């Protein structure tokens, strides 16, 4: 009776070992597949690709007016950058 029980355990052990090996191979294949896949990034909105506006002093203009135009353009650019960052955060 003990011999029969031992044979049953041994044959069950072989099957389990094969299943474990198959599970390990499947797991390794899945891991390799995940490493080979490149993430797909969505296309950026056009405003994210545009250059910052430039401001130049005009003849006879006070420096403060040029500075105010530059600050306005910098604020617009900051808003664009925040929208672009939110675009990727939402994706």
Image (tube, helix red, strand yellow):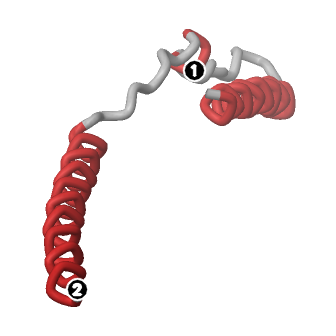
Instruction: List x then y, in percent, for residue 14.
Output: 14, 69
Residue lying at 52% horizontally and 18% vertically, measured from the top left:
44
Task: Tell me the number on the disc at residue 48.
Answer: 1
**Dividing the picture into quarters, in which one does residue 79 lie?**
top right
The single residue placed furthest to the bottom in the displayed view is 2
Contact between marks 1 and 2 (CB within 8 A): the answer is no
The reply, left or right, for residue 56 in relation to residue 16 is: right
Task: Tell me the number on the disc at residue 1.
Answer: 2
Q: Earlier in the sequence, mark 1 or mark 2?
A: 2
Asked if residue 68 is positioned above or below residue 54 in the image, the reply reads below
67 or 44: nearer the viewer: 44
**Dividing the picture into quarters, in which one does residue 34 lie?**
top left
The reply, left or right, for residue 77 in relation to residue 47 is: right
Locate the N terminus by quadrant.
bottom left
43 or 37: nearer the viewer: 37
Residue lying at 15% horizontally and 69% vertically, measured from the top left:
11
Instruction: List x then y, in percent, for residue 69.
Output: 79, 23
Disc 1 packing (10 Å; few <14; some 14–19; many ≥20):
some
């Amino acid at each position: 009776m003990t011999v029969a029980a031992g044979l049953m355990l041994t044959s069950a052990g072989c099957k389990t070992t094969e299943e474990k090996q198959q599970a390990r191979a499947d797991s390794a294949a899945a891991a390799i597949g995940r490493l080979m896949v490149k993430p797909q990034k969505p296309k950026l909105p056009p405003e994210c690709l545009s250059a910052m506006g430039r401001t130049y002093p005009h003849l006879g203009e006070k420096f403060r007016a040029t500075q105010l135009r530059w600050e306005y353009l910098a604020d617009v650019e900051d808003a664009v950058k925040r929208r672009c960052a939110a675009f990727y955060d939402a994706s």
